[in-house]
Structure formats: C-alpha cells, structure tokens
Image: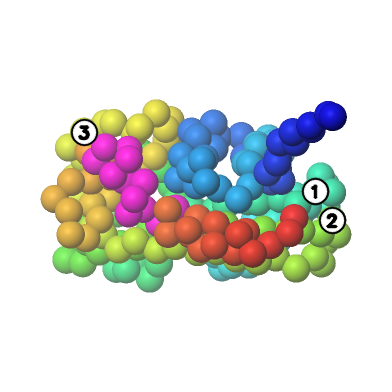
C-alpha cells in the first residue's frame, strides 16, 4: 500500500514593486497565515496624475496588461489638511526634492499641522486594460512634526520621521517596526485585502 502526501501550495500573487523594503513590510503584515504568497516584480509603470483612486486603477490595469497575471499594486499618499490634501499621491516627488525637513517647512505658515496617511492597494485579476480593479484602502490620522530621528526602518526616502500618528508621542520612525505595522495605513489596507483574498479563488 502506498500513501501519498501532498503539500497544499498557496496561490502566488505578483506585487508590482521594485522596493524591497515595501515588499518585506507587506509580507510581514500579512504574516504566515496569509491566504496568498506575495512575490514581487519590478515593472517600470508610468507616473500618473489624478485622484488617488484614479491613479491606482490605471496603474493596476497597466500592470495586469503587461504581465497577464493577477497583480497587486500600491500607492501611498500623505495629505496635509491645511493644503487641501497636498502633497497627496505626489509625496514621492516632494520627499525626494525637499527631504523630510522640507515637508515641515511647507506647513510653516499654518496652525493646522494635521495630516492623513493613506495606503491604497489595487488588485486586478484580468489581463486587459479595462479589467475590473478592486481597491483596498487604509487611512491613519496624525500630525506633521519636526524630525527627531533619521531612522527610516531601512527606507531610502521616507516621511516616517515627521509623521506622528494620533494617540502617540512618537513618529513612525521612532516606533518599533512591529508596532508601526500594527497601526499603519498599510496595515489597515492589507487587513481588508487579506479578508477579501480569504474568500477569493485566484
């Protein structure tokens, strides 16, 4: 009599990013009980303009069109309430040009230093430009403060050192990475995604 043991493999989901730290953070947040195995693919996607949701939909559709696989993309925004939501989805370019201290200077003339960090994931199962994109979004409220440390948890360009989440007297950069991952906008978005994937057949 022969007994065969089969190993149940999780379906793989391609996360389109060239940022190894972002991949590592996503994998850590989803944890070992994730219903999917996240693998990365570095794909040079066009830099789009528009509202947060519009950008993520077009970005996701383009990635799916090129790879012809179920794909996951993410876009992070930092929105200053005093500036009507700017820099928003363009924070990547602001941080590169101004550095964290420059972000603080943007609000120098305003009493309102409040901000909202937003993480938006887009998932597309199809392989054509007009495929349906599901959006999973997380938001964390906080305040923009002067940087106390320059610890970016390994990120080359990051605004963690100037964003202090509500209810804390430390910035993201001062928190242990495990604690940050339990309260961040990315965590909130990924918990919605994880719940959805638990019910989905890739």
Where does label 3 land, which residue?
Answer: 149
| Quadrant, the C terminus | bottom right
Q: Secondary structure at mark 1?
A: loop
Residue 21: x percent and y percent? Answer: 48, 33
> Quick one: which residue is furthest to the front in this view?
1
Q: CA distance from mark 3 to mark 1?
A: 40 Å
Crowding at dot 3, Cα within 10 Å, few <14 / some 14-19 / many 20+, comes out as few
Residue 53: x percent and y percent? Answer: 59, 67
> Quick one: which residue is furthest to the bottom in this view?
84
Image quadrant where residue 129 sits = bottom right
112 in magenta: no
Where does label 1 land, which residue?
Answer: 69
The stretch in magenta equals 175-186
Q: Earlier in the sequence, mark 3 or mark 2?
A: 2
Where does label 2 land, which residue?
Answer: 127
Q: Earlier in the sequence, mark 3 or mark 1?
A: 1
**47 relative to 32 in the view: left or right:** right
Q: Nearer the viewer, residue 9 or 192?
A: 9
């Amino acid at each position: 009599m022969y007994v065969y043991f089969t190993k149940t493999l999780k379906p793989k989901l391609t996360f389109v990013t060239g940022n190894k730290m972002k991949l590592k953070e996503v994998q850590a947040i989803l944890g070992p009980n994730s219903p999917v195995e996240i693998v990365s693919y570095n794909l040079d996607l066009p830099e789009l303009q528009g509202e947060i949701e519009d950008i993520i939909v077009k970005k996701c559709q383009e990635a799916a069109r090129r790879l012809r696989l179920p794909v996951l993309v993410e876009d992070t925004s930092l929105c200053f309430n005093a500036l009507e939501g700017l820099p928003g989805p363009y924070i990547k370019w602001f941080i590169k040009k101004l550095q964290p201290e420059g972000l603080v200077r943007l609000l120098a003339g305003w009493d309102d230093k409040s901000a909202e960090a937003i993480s938006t994931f887009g998932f597309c199962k199809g392989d054509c430009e007009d495929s349906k994109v599901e959006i999973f979004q997380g938001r964390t409220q906080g305040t923009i403060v002067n940087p106390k440390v320059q610890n970016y948890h390994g990120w080359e360009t990051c605004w963690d050192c100037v964003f202090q989440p509500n209810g804390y007297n430390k910035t993201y950069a001062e928190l242990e990475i495990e604690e940050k991952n339990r309260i961040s906008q990315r965590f909130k978005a990924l918990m919605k995604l994880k719940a959805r994937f638990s019910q989905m057949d890739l």
